[in-house]
Structure formats: C-alpha cells, structure tokens
Amino acid sequence: MTGADSTGGTGSTGGTEGADHDRVRRSYDAVAEEYRARIGDELDGKPLDRALLGALAEQAGDGARLADLGCGPGHVAAWLAGRGTSVVGFDLSPAMVAIGRERHPEVEFREGDLLRLPAGDGEFDAAVALYSLIHLAPDELAPALTEIRRVLRPGGGLLVAFHIGSEVRNLTEWWGHEVDVDFHFLEPSAVAAALQEAGFRIKARLERAPYPHEAETRRACLLARRED
C-alpha cells in the first residue's frame, strides 16, 4: 500500500509508544491536510465499501453508537453519522483529529491508539477499522483486537479492511512530504483467525480488486460480531 488511498487513518502507538509508533504519528501529521483534500470524498467512488458500512450501521440500529478506529480526517465517521448513528472517531494523529473536529462537528473525535482506546467497556454498538490495522506490528494485532472487543457491547459488529499479502512497505515520501511509515499487508485467513481468537465470529468476507483511483493492491473486508 502507498497510503494514498487508505480509507482509514493511523493505527496504534502500541503499549510502549516506541519510536516506530512515533514515526506513524509524525507521518500522518505531515500529510493531514493533503490527505483530507485527496481522500475526503473517496467513499463517493467506493460502492462496495459503502454497502458494507451501510450494512454495519443498519445492523447496529437507529441511534446506535459507533466507533471509527483510525478515522483520519473523519470522512467515514461523518458518512456513518449521516445514517442515523452517533459516531466517535479515534486517531493517533493530532492533526487528523483537529481536521475532523473542524470539518465534522456532528462527530466526536478523540486522540487514541488501538491498544489503549480512551473508551469505556462496552461503550459502542459497532466499530470500523478501515486500513488502520496495517500500522500494527505483527505482535500487536491480537492485543489490539482484544481491546476493540472490550469497547464493544456483546453482539456488537466490527468491520475491518486491509491490504492482502505478507509484505511490509515503507514509505519515505508522500505527496511531497517527508515521512517514515510502514504498511503491513495481511492475509485474510490470519486476520480471521486472530478475530476468532479475540472472541469474534466472522459473519462475512469480501475480497476485491482496487478501484481505478486506488493503489494496485487487493483488499479484504471482514465483517465480524463480538461473541457474548
């Protein structure tokens, strides 16, 4: 993944908030304004993504409380809020959170990471993590999914999306900005197994080719439900 078409934002700082996670934060801070300008309307051209997000919101029900984990500038959170849900967007990047608060006042935004979410137990009826798991180190995936489960009510839905593969791509230049951020491709079977181990049941799987405006990688979406 080049990062230029990610529908999410940044991932986790990790429990130790080490140098790798600081790199992710600084990189997304650097590109935040350009990211919003290029990515802010991307759902208009992603019918399958909209369908999955709509299904998650419909299953959660009117007035449900949703979390957008790795929300970037808040465009996905705002789309969900327009479907009758109350949405909280979480992102590691202060610059992304600031843009979200300015542009989408109907959404609540919090700075936070996937391993230690600033949220209560069972606070949300559903959650999305679109292209945010890709910034986790391999040994952080399981604890991150356990943390996501913590903030979901029993039976709560979760939609995750990621790029398919086993490689790690490092990006040092992004839209003219100097960055240093890794993108971890993931195998759908491995993510499904990690979800099940964390206490989720897989309800649907989808793999798709990239849209013409996206980086040329195959993508996977998994729709899961927290077991009681």
Image (tube, rainbow, N blue to C red):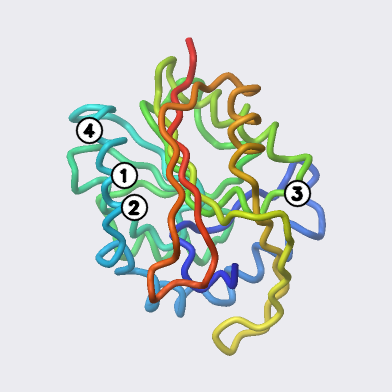
Query: Is 157 placed left or right of 55 in the picture?
Result: right
Q: Which residue in the protein does label 4 denote?
A: 58
Q: Which residue in the protein does label 2 denote?
A: 49
Distance from Cα at disc 2 to Cα at disc 1: 6 Å
Say whether disc 3 or disc 1 marks the residue closer to the N-terminus.
1
Query: Is 74 placed left or right of 227 in the picture?
Result: left
Q: Residues within 10 Å of mark 4 (few under 14, many from 20)?
A: some
Determine the residue positioned at 38% across, 42% down.
Answer: 88
- Say the numbered circle drawn on residue 53: 1
Q: Which residue in the protein does label 3 denote?
A: 137
Query: Is 8 placed left or right of 181 in the picture?
Result: left
Distance from Cα at disc 4 to Cα at disc 2: 14 Å
Distance from Cα at disc 4 to Cα at disc 3: 32 Å
What SS does tag 1 mark?
helix
Determine the residue positioned at 59% across, 29% down.
Answer: 195
Q: Residue furthest bottom?
A: 176
